[in-house]
Amino acid sequence: MREGDIINGLVKGLAVIECFDEGHASQSITDVANRTGLERATARRCLLTLTSLGYASYDGKFFRLTPRVLNLGHSYLAATPLPRLIQPFLEELSTATGESTSAAMLEGTDILYIARASIRRVMSINLAPGARLPAYCTSMGRVLLSALPSTKAKAVLDQSELIAYTARTKADLPTITTELAVVAAQGFAVIDEELELGLCSIAVPIFNAQGQTVAALNIGAQTARASTSHMIANFLPLMRKVQAEVRPLLR
């Protein structure tokens, strides 16, 4: 792609939209400029443009996104069959296990949740569709990274901020690389209190009919209810069943 083909104004506008999140739902022009790295005047023009189009509201000091922004996500969901297709399988799996299930795709250095069936909240953050978590220390992230060519996986890890969220987090490149090889060989990933204390999860890849990994499926639970060994023994066979049932449906 040539640099001249890029519309810089659109790039800046999308950066402004993306800088709003759960912890920054209401922001001033200065706040947005600081979070995006844009000049204050540029941030102001972007915010006023979004307001004029109905994507943001302004009370004279602070800007907030409006529900119209959901149209952008709806366009993706309407054009992409996977979230709609996988949702009934997630709900059935949650009912069978009594735990929350999710599906995610790799987006940059993060996993992006595209579907979820929540029995109970297992993490301190909201994991609704659209939520992001770092790929290197999540079960779905490791499944998705393990499916990449080694050079591409390394490039993602090189760009990632490898933080030890707990004392159990694998947060150095050699250890993560070794773990990805294990995940690729066994066909599933388990996380035991690496992202948050008291939380474990298990994930498997979701294949399309051509055998390509297009997403990942996981079950997350509190360790007091389900250890990783329990997940492997009891949840993995059910996840393998979903994996096999979904594959011929994704063409």
Image (tube, helix red, strand yellow):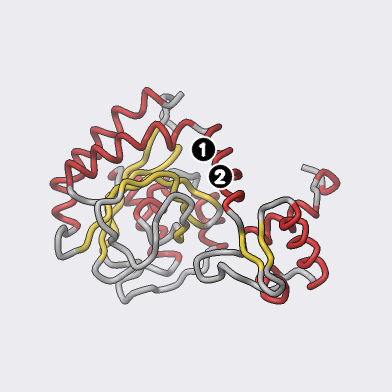
Looking at the image, the residue that sits furthest to the right is 4
Residue under circle 1? 77
User: What kind of element bears circle 2?
Assistant: helix
Between 80 and 213, which is closer to the camera in this rendering?
80
Quadrant in which the N terminus appears: top right
In the image, residue 211 above or below residue 31: above
Q: Position of residue 75 (x, y in %)?
A: 58, 38
Percent from the top left, x then y, of residue 34? 69, 75
- The residue sitting at 32% across, 51% down in the picture is 182
Q: Position of residue 204 (x, y in %)?
A: 32, 43
- Dots 2 and 1: beta carbons under 8 Å? yes
Q: Is residue 27 left or right of residue 110?
A: right
Q: Is disc 1 surrounded by few (<14), some (14 to 19) or many (20+) residues within 10 Å?
A: some
In the image: residue 34, left or right of residue 236: right
Label 1: which secondary element: helix
**169 and 66: which is toward the camera:** 66
Query: In terms of depth relative to the viewer, which is nearer, 62 or 88?
Result: 62
Instruction: Please name the amino acid that badge 2 sits on.
Output: Gly
Q: Amino acid at mark 1?
A: Leu
C-alpha distance separating marks 2 and 1: 6 Å
Q: Closest to the observer: 92 or 220? A: 92
**What residue is rendered at 17% in x and 41% in y?**
96
Mark sitting on residue 73: 2
Residue 68: image x %, image y %? Answer: 61, 49
Q: Quadrant of residue 247?
A: top left
Badge count: 2
